[in-house]
Image: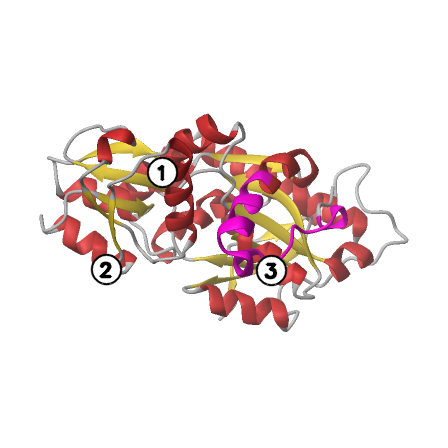
Amino acid sequence: MWRRGALVVLVGVLAAGLLPAGGVSEDEAVPDEVRLTLFLGPTALGFIPLLEAGEVGGVPLSYELVPQPDVAVSRILAGETDVAALPVNLAARLYNGGADYRMAAMYLWGLLYLVAPEPVTLEGLAGRRVYVPGKGATPDLVFRFLLEKRGIEGVELDYSLPPAGLAQAVAAGKVDYALLPEPFVSRVLALREDLVVALDLQAEWEREVGTPLTQTCIVVKGEFLEHHPAFWKEVRRAIEESIHQVVADPDATASSPVVEKLGLTADLARAAIPRCRLSYVPAREARQAVEAYLGVLLEYAPGSVGGALPPAEWYVE
């Protein structure tokens, strides 16, 4: 269900619910509310100050925290959300499939890590069994791409466990080499002192491709852009400020009561924030990195991006 955040005035918004000087003109209709869809877990951490505020420019903010991609997809296909945070390839696939939700910004640039008993190079994995959550999922595609680009052979990839089950197996000492996303990385490291973050997949990607690994983006409904172009700038500014606050003060974010709603603890949130590499970058500025990432997925699994790179108009200001 949609949740209403506490009404707290956001940084940069004048008191009494008024828009900042130079904001929305009197000729533009302002929406009754802004509807936001986020996934449970660390990808929503950058939005915590905004969720605490509960409004943007005096307009109420309603938000839904969804457990699975199919729930977010259903909201988007039904046009029931204005703004959403989605995996980049899912956002591209939906747009290519006819859902008019444009990419507004990149904001989360890292989630994938290899945990192991000691630091290791990609080359050092030859001859080892590495557990990977989900054959054909994006972590698997990224990992296989890196192995193939380096010409590394002899790595046994085991897909027998789903993400949650794999994390449990690692925590129980049954698995030592595992590719995991946050928050599972922080969870298993808290339970097993003999494990470390052995390999940073984001760093390996950037070393190989030359651009950052783009993982989660912000999309906005085309109709919302058309009807509320000036107000959208207020929304965009509020999201950017929220992400900046989280990066600047992760301890304050971790202590927020909203963290529990995301299915995290304060300790997990505090550990996960730096590894999520949160940074707001407008879509058009991030396009090169996004296309590098989607291009690899297009080669390995065309259906994962909807069979084509999205056109230039997908990237909005």
Residue 180 forms part of the magenta stretch: no
Secondary structure under tag 2 reads loop
Image location (x, y in percent) of residue 272: 34, 39
Horizontal side of residue 202 vs 14, given as left or right: left
| Tag 2: amino acid | Leu
Q: Look at mark 2 in the image and give the residue it sits on.
A: 161
Q: Look at mark 3 in the image and give the residue it sits on.
A: 306
* Distance of label 2 from label 1 (alpha carbons): 21 Å
Which residue occupies the extreme right position in the image?
A: 27
Circle 1 crowding by C-alpha within 10 Å: few under 14, some 14–19, many from 20:
some
* Distance of label 3 from label 1 (alpha carbons): 24 Å
Image location (x, y in percent) of residue 28: 86, 54
* Distance of label 2 from label 3 (alpha carbons): 27 Å
Secondary structure under tag 3 reads loop
Main SS type for the magenta part?
Answer: helix
* Residue in view at x 86 percent, y 47 percent: 25
The correct choice, above or below, for 280 with respect to 259 in the image is above
Q: Look at mark 1 in the image and give the residue it sits on.
A: 147
Residues under numbered marks 3 and 1 in contact, where contact means CB atoms less than 8 Å apart: no
